[in-house]
Image: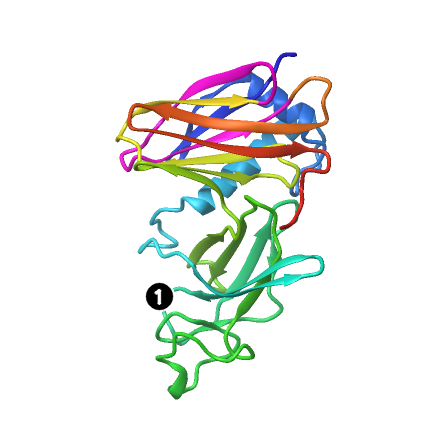
Amino acid sequence: MKVQTDFIYFNGKMFIKTLAWASLALALRIGFAQSIGQGVGPGGQLAAITVMQQQIGLDDAAANERNPNGLRIQFQKISEVQQADGHLVKYRMLVPGVPEKQSYVLEVWRIGTEVQNTPQQVYINAKGLLMWHEPRPNQEDKDSLDSKEEIEVELKSARGEPIRYILASPDGKLFIPGTVVPYPAENRNGNCRMETRLGFPEGEGMLVYLDGLASGAAVPLQTDSGSETHSQHAIADAHGHTVAIVAPFVPGNNAGVVKISMTIKACSVSVDMPWGDGSYRPM
């Protein structure tokens, strides 16, 4: 049985390399997408890849004209509770360095859904703590507040599922992203780290983040979803970081597990991820 699991590599603002099989795998696996609607034809393939480009853009956002200081939303874990239907993790959000004395819009983007706005405008105190109202003088230097005043998010998610937030000024001139992954699908060895994130709920596309590599290094990235494997080389940027899009697909199978691995002289890392029908399972 031939395994068609291929890669698209993303480095900076452009894809370095696109393989034909990746588009085919996406076409065969993605029957829906976030705000796509074009089905599985060429337009649907392109839209699916575009969605994942946007995800990478938010995760790896560098300083730009709408975020000149390269700020990121920070997530501070408050608690984790086991409920009858799974784990619930609660976070507060901070963005140190954001201008005060003004209101902001907070948006959330979960895989498989459209971007959602919070029901009201939000505010920031001097420590960067996100709040539901303008901070009073005695709240300006607080790192945390009562849950009725600070913004807290309660998240249920699957392993490797990212939740992305965006803090923006009402005029759109300031745009600050942040990504939280409550249950990372990651592996570390030596200086190397691999993390795999779901691009779509059932793993039709996945994002593979590699860190700790030598600047400009070409590293072998391999997938194994069955009796055969596929491999290519990813190119690290100046910071030893690279991202690949993986689209697992096995002809005749609606689901499976893909092992994504990288082995070089300095380290060896791998992550196993389920994909296909019924694979999305919140922790």
Q: Secondary structure at mark 1?
A: loop
The residue carrying pointer 1 sits among few (fewer than 14), some (14 to 19) or many (20 or more) residues within 10 Å by Cα, namely: some
Residue placed most toward the observer, 254 or 243: 254
Question: Is 228 one of the magenta-colored residues?
Answer: yes
Per the rendered image, the range of residues in magenta is 225-249
> Residue at 55% of width from left, 16% of height from top?
20
Residue 103 versus residue 82 in the image, above or below: below
Vertical placement of 4 versus 120: above or below? above
Residue beneath disc 1: 96
Along the viewing direction, whichever of 237 and 261 lies nearer the viewer: 261
Relative image position of residue 101 (x, y in whole percent) = 40, 76
Residue lying at the far top in this picture: please name it: 1
Compared to 252, does 180 lie above or below?
below
Q: Quadrant of the N terminus?
A: top right
User: Quarter of the image holding residue 21?
Assistant: top right
Q: Residue at x 47, y 80 (%)?
A: 134
Q: Count numbered badges in the picture.
A: 1
The figure's colour scheme reads rainbow
Residue 101 drawn above or below residue 42: below
Direction from residue 52 to residue 143 in the image, left or right:
left
Quarter assignment of residue 29: top right
Q: Position of residue 114 (x, y in %)?
A: 64, 50
